[in-house]
């Protein structure tokens, strides 16, 4: 039974493909050959669209007719730093409308940095009978009325996660719209809501959902109501407290400690607004089982933090304010040998003088003491090449390294040299580095290092760095796996951009603001590369009212199969053949 | 049965072969006593087998059939016939344990041990031999540790993709669940994490079916996939 070129039957391939779920592998499958492309598109159930403008709803629906789960991302990352003006885009409505018609069995919608209206939420609530998961991450544009529609209609809802979204909180009544018969909730995150929710409704909801594993409350939930909630859900694995303060009364404390002790499966803690330090020890009974701790709202001092952290021997992830100081980080390094991720946020980023004793030494200690450390986000006020070198050599297994030295263009505080060599050591030693954020005084040389060694780098964030176009050229020509590049306030201009135009088609997006890219170059890029959208943002008026050589305020370039978008506000222009003509 | 040491099983086999003469079943009786001792079978369970009412009288079962019944006929063989008309003798227990199709055939009585062979017209000799190898090994070594079994499986599947295809078709036809899962896992690993040019080579895909423009555009947009 010899076959010249056998091929596995469709059912076999379909079955094999069902085990292959990562987006990268699925893309790979669809590129192998036309017949695999066809099989794959019919059995794809989950899709991730990293830039909602890279594709359009009709194109997505045509290619993948049987989706159950869709993830969309809208605004560029620098929107988190208020660099993307209001009204820029990222509207979820056209997507939700289209999906409501095409995917009646859709189960999951995850949106990040998108504008979602109440109308969209109502459409979701009414259109998908088996809807299970709604995650709105850093989204905006909706109110608690939209949430009420979801609560009232989605009988099979498992997850409602509003992380960091801006919600117009009209009333806490929406929670009562979950019918009494509804018991399938597994995850609820309302930490971003401003007002009080109906606490009685919350308690009833929590106690009647036996599979509730994640509960993240908002600040308005008072501490004395927490024990009751915990007793209603002893199976909780992840908890975000509300405000962590109350009149100091012994019965409140013991009640709380007892309630925490009863949650034998609790592994993740967050919340901790307005912490009263004397209440912190109430969590001691469960510290030894914690793997993730988010204290980024906890304004408590180092000694209290140290007492807490030293008990968490299984900790893998810690987010904390710089109140922890170098001393606290040293204790962390000694106690938490399983630490994989550390984020240290600034308590007073706009202050001129340091308010805490946190320096580069803290990070060095952690890099020495924690062998599994992979992901770092660290805000500090001073750094040295020597420290970066030590960190790089200690932890070649780093995959994400984001350093934010608060004052732009700060040199090595010991030698007053640029920090090129330090970051160079990071990219050279950390061969699996996928994400890097630079800060401090940096010349073109750091980009040469990055282009040479950053072969696995996927995302790079740059601010106030470099001397010339050469810097940008090194990165675009050297980083083979680069997907996202975001740059602000750097002297990068036309030459490097145009010389590496083809590279931009292999990336998701490029953001450049307050750089030296001229309007003329943007036009050329737009005309030369039809599969890119070259968007120029300028709030001071149309770019062609100034000479061609004058720099554009903001530039956002991304690959797309959907052509120029049609929902741009007045301050955004797409550079392509038509618009170039239109403007001039 | 699983805990019975294999040495005893072989001596019993020898005993049966010598004694499988319906004329002198009584020679088995002392051996049967020994067997009872070895297996610590409760009296009442054995008597249920030994004595059965036939035509109003109570008749003692032939000992060798009792023994075979007690052992679940491990040594009974069945005949499988490949598409090339080659006959393979396999322990019934081995095939019944793994193949749903063969198990059903034996159970519903459509297979007669004396004469029938099971024709497998879709499976060639080479593949059938491999399938039998797999089932036999997994029956005889089912108490081995996981690592050893996995190593053996890996070695077993070290075939070219044509061979893998034939094995898959056979395992599918015979409904051998664990072999199917193993093969699917292997095919998955031939795809996951591999470059596209490599996948095309492994699966012998000579014509990818895209237009030259499409292929060029794909290579431009996803250079690190190729």
Image: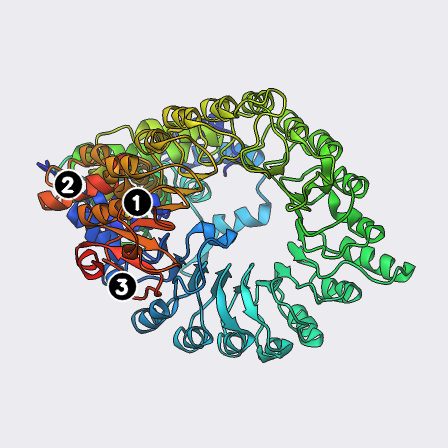
Choose between A510 and B215: the one closer to the eye: A510
The chain under label 1 reads A
Characterize the local packing of mark 3: few (<14), some (14-19) or many (20 or more) Cα atoms within 10 angstroms: some
Residue A414: image location, x then y, percent = 63, 21
Residue at 58%, 79% (x, y): give it.
A177
Question: Tags 1 and 2 in contact by the CB under 8 Å rule?
Answer: no
Question: What's the mark number on residue A486?
Answer: none
Residue A175: image location, x then y, percent = 61, 75
**Tag 3 or tag 1, which sits nearer the N-term?**
3
Residue at numbered disc 1: A518
Could you say which quadrant of the image residue A64 lies in? bottom left
Question: What's the mark number on residue A61?
Answer: 3
State how far apart marks 1 and 3 are (Cα). Answer: 37 Å
Same chain, marks 1 and 2?
A: no
Residue A56: image location, x then y, percent = 28, 61
Q: Is residue A88 above or below residue A303?
A: below
Residue at numbered disc 2: B216
Characterize the local packing of mark 2: few (<14), some (14-19) or many (20 or more) Cα atoms within 10 angstroms: few
């Amino acid at each position: 039974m010899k076959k010249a070129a056998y091929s596995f039957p469709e059912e076999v391939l379909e079955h094999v493909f069902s085990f292959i779920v990562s987006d990268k592998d699925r893309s790979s499958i669809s590129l192998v050959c036309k017949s695999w492309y066809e099989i794959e598109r019919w059995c794809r159930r989950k899709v991730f669209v990293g830039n909602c403008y890279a594709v359009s709803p009709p194109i997505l629906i045509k290619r993948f007719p049987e989706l159950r789960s869709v993830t969309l991302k809208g605004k560029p990352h620098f929107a988190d730093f208020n660099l993307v003006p209001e009204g820029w885009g990222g509207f979820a409505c056209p997507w939700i409308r289209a999906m409501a018609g095409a995917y009646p069995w859709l189960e999951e919608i995850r949106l990040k940095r998108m504008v979602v209206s109440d109308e969209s939420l109502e459409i979701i609530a009414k259109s998908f009978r088996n809807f299970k998961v709604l995650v709105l991450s850093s989204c905006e544009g909706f109110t608690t009325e939209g949430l009420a529609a979801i609560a009232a209609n989605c009988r099979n809802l498992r997850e409602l996660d509003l992380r960091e979204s801006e919600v117009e909180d009209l009333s806490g009544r929406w929670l009562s719209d979950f019918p009494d018969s509804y018991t399938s909730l597994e995850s609820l995150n309302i930490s971003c809501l401003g007002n009080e929710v109906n606490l009685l409704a919350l308690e009833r909801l929590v106690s009647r959902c036996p599979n509730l594993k994640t509960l993240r409350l908002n600040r308005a939930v008072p501490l004395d109501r927490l024990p009751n909630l915990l007793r209603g859900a002893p199976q909780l694995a992840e908890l975000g407290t509300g405000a962590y303060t109350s009149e100091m009364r012994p019965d409140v404390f013991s009640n709380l400690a007892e309630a925490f002790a009863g949650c034998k499966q609790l592994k993740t803690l967050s919340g901790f607004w307005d912490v009263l330090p004397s209440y912190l020890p109430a969590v001691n009974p469960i510290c030894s089982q914690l793997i993730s701790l988010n204290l980024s709202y906890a304004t408590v001092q180092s000694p209290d933090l140290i007492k807490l952290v030293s008990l968490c021997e299984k900790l893998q992830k810690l987010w904390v304010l710089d109140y922890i100081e170098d001393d606290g980080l040293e204790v962390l390094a000694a106690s938490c040998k399983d630490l994989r991720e550390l984020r240290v946020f600034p308590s007073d980023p706009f202050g001129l003088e340091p308010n805490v004793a946190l320096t580069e030494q803290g990070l060095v200690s952690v890099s020495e003491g924690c062998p599994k450390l992979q992901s770092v986000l660290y805000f500090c006020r001073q750094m040295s090449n020597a420290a970066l070198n030590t960190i790089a050599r200690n932890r070649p297994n780093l995959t994400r390294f984001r350093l934010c030295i608060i004052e732009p263009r700060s040199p090595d505080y010991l030698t007053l040299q640029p920090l090129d060599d330090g970051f160079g050591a990071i990219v050279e030693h950390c061969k699996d580095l996928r994400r890097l954020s630079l800060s401090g005084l940096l010349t073109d040389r750091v980009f040469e290092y990055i282009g040479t060694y950053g072969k696995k780098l996927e995302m790079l964030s740059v601010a106030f760095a470099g001397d010339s176009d050469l810097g940008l050229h090194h990165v675009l020509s050297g980083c083979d796996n680069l997907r996202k590049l975001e740059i602000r306030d750097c002297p990068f201009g036309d030459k490097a951009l145009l010389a590496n135009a083809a590279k931009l088609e292999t990336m998701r997006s490029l953001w450049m603001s307050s750089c030296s890219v001229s309007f003329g170059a943007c036009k050329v890029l737009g005309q030369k590369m039809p599969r890119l959208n070259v968007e120029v943002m300028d709030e001071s008026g149309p770019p062609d009212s100034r000479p061609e050589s004058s720099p554009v305020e903001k530039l956002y370039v991304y690959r797309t199969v959907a052509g120029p978008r049609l929902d741009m506000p007045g301050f955004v222009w797409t550079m392509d053949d038509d618009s170039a003509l239109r403007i001039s | 049965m699983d805990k019975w040491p294999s040495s005893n099983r072989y001596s019993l086999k020898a005993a049966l072969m010598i004694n499988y003469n319906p004329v002198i079943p009584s020679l088995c009786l002392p051996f049967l006593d020994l067997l009872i001792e070895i297996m610590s079978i409760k009296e009442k369970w054995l008597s249920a087998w030994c004595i059965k009412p036939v035509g109003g009288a109570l008749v003692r079962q032939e000992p060798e059939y009792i023994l075979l019944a007690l052992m679940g006929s491990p040594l009974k063989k069945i005949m499988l016939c490949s598409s090339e008309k080659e006959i393979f003798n396999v322990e019934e227990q081995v095939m019944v344990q793994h193949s749903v199709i063969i198990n059903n055939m034996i159970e519903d009585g459509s297979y007669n041990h004396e004469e029938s062979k099971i024709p497998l017209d879709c499976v060639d000799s080479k593949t059938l031999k491999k399938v039998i190898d797999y089932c036999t090994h997994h029956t005889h070594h089912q108490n081995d540790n996981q690592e050893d079994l996995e190593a053996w499986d890996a070695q077993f599947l070290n075939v070219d993709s044509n061979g893998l295809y034939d094995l898959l078709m056979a395992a599918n036809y015979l409904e051998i669940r664990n072999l199917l899962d193993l093969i699917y896992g292997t095919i998955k690993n031939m795809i996951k994490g591999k470059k596209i040019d490599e996948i095309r080579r492994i699966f012998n895909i000579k014509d990818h079916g895209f237009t030259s423009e499409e292929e060029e555009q794909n290579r431009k947009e996803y250079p690190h996939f190729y």
